[in-house]
Amino acid sequence: MDKKDIYEHLAKIYLDTPLKRQQRIHQAWDTSKKTTYVTVAAAVAAIAVLLASVIFLFAKKGIMPKNKDFAYVIQTEAAKIRFNFDPAKKEVYAITLNKLNLAPFKQLAFSLKKSNYRDTLALRVELSNTFNEKSEIYIKDISNRWKEYRLDLAGFKNINDWSEMTDLAFVLEEWNALDKSGAVYVDNIRFLR
């Protein structure tokens, strides 16, 4: 063996060894990436199955509603209707509906509570449209704890055309309150199909 052959042999040994080591590292990395992807996919699938089974159990036990209402939300924050009937005869909290088409809806839903538990109150809920049709329903025995009310729109007898509604009003009148001052809160006002 001459010097040239020895140099080539040594070069081959020393230069090929790092390349083989790098190839082994890359192969190990590719294998671990595949394992990681499979592990993540299995974890996601397990979580999805777990969530589906929890939702199914809640629906079966009646914790979740089986048929969800489609709602057109008018107001999500509580409104406070203060009344002081010393000079005034009524207090009105009105919401402009801007010619809203309520024909596809069946109910008006909202929550109420009064500030004074001793007070006896009745609240008038009033709807009107662009054709000067106006109708009302009275809510009696308002509680001092939040209570949800659902009023069928068919109960507003004097309204024939629901295509262009203008106003929704909550009215407190002096003759419907035992105390002359206080407050009523209205929250989560929405129309349901």
Image: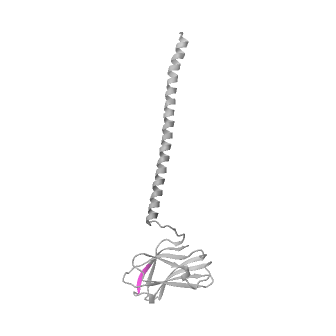
Is 109 included in the stretch rendered in magenta? Answer: no
Viewport quadrant of the C terminus:
bottom right
Q: Is residue 63 above or below residue 93?
A: above
Position in image of residue 168 (x %, y %): 54, 79
**In terms of secondary structure, what is the magenta stretch mainly?**
strand
Residue displayed at 54% across by 16% down: 8
User: Residue lying furthest left in this view?
Assistant: 118
The one nearer the camera, 118 or 39, is 39
Q: Residue furthest front?
A: 60
Residue located 50% across and 37% down the image: 31
Task: Using residue 150 as the reference point, say whether residue 179 is left or right of it.
Answer: left
Q: Quadrant of residue 98?
A: bottom right
Q: Which residues are magenta?
A: 180-184
Q: Position of residue 60 (x, y in %)?
A: 45, 64
* Residue at image location 53% in from the left, 15% down from the top: 7
Between 67 and 39, which is closer to the camera in this rendering? 67
